[in-house]
Image (spheres, grey):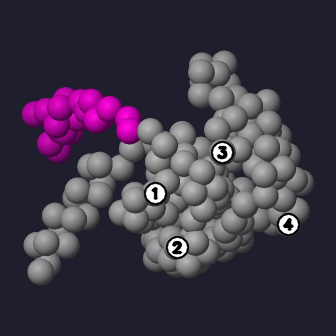
Amino acid sequence: MIWRNVVELDKTIKERRSIRRYRDEDIPDSVIEELLDLARYAPSSMNGQPWYFIVVRNDETKRRLAEIKNRHCPPEKRMYQADFLQNAPVVVVVCVDRERSFNRGVENAVLATANIMLGASRRGLGSVYMSAYRMDDPSISEEIRQDLDIPRDVDPITIIPLGYPGETPQPKKLRSLDEVIFYENFGKK
C-alpha cells in the first residue's frame, strides 16, 4: 500500500503542468477547501503557520488582478500576460502574516502554494504559479493588498488560478540528472 502511494505521488509530481486555459466549469467549494487544507500542512518557519488564503470567484476582481499583474510584468516575461486569470473559475491568493513568518514569508507561501498545486493536479485541476510580489517592485504587492483589502501586516505572495484544463501542454523537457547533481562540492561528479 505504501509503495502504491509513493508511485501515485511521484506520478502527480511528474505530470503536473502549468495550465493557462480552463474549461468553463465551476469547481465546488468543497474541492477548494480540500486544497486549502492541504496547504495548511506545508512546512513553515518555526511552525508559524502564517497563511491566509483569499478565494476569488468574482470576474471583476479577477480582471483587476490580471491588470495589476500585466502592469508590473517585467519585459522578459511579457509573452506571459496574465489575462487568462479572468477565465479561471477560481483564483487563490496566498498571503502570509509577516510576524508569524519569521522573516521567511516568501518561502512559507511558496511551500503552501506547492501543496495546493500538487493537490489540484491530483484532482484533475490545472494551475500555474504566479507571483504576487517582486523584490525589485514592491508596488505590485501594494496594489494587490489595496485591491483585496489585505491588512498591512499581511503580504500577498502568490496567485494561483485553478480550473479544469482546457489545454494539454507537451511533456516537460528536463535537464539530465547528471547536469544538476554534484557530490560534496559544486562541480564534483
x and y percentages locating residue 127 in the rendered image: 50, 50
- Amino acid type, residue under disc 1 in the picture: Leu
- Identity of the amino acid at label 2? Val
| CA separation in Å, label 3 and label 2 | 18 Å
- Does the residue at mark 4 contact the one at mark 2 (Cβ under 8 Å)? no
Q: Which quadrant holds residue 154?
A: bottom right
Name the residue that disc number 3 marks: 87
- Judging from the image, what secondary structure is the residue with disc 2 in? helix
Gap between marks 1 and 4 measured at Cα: 30 Å
Q: CA distance from mark 1 to mark 3?
A: 14 Å
Q: Are marks 1 and 4 in contact (CB under 8 Å)?
A: no
Q: CA distance from mark 2 to mark 1?
A: 10 Å
Quadrant in the picture for the N terminus: bottom left
**Residue corresponding to mark 1:** 125
Q: Is residue 105 magenta?
A: no
Q: Quadrant of the C terminus?
A: top left
Looking at marks 2 and 1 on the same chain, the residue that comes earlier in the sequence is marked by: 2
Q: Which quadrant holds residue 13?
A: bottom left
Q: Say what amino acid the circle numbered 3 marks.
A: Asn
Residue 31: give its label.
2
Looking at the image, do the residues carrying marks 4 and 3 touch, with CB atoms under 8 Å apart?
A: no
Extent of the magenta region: 168-189
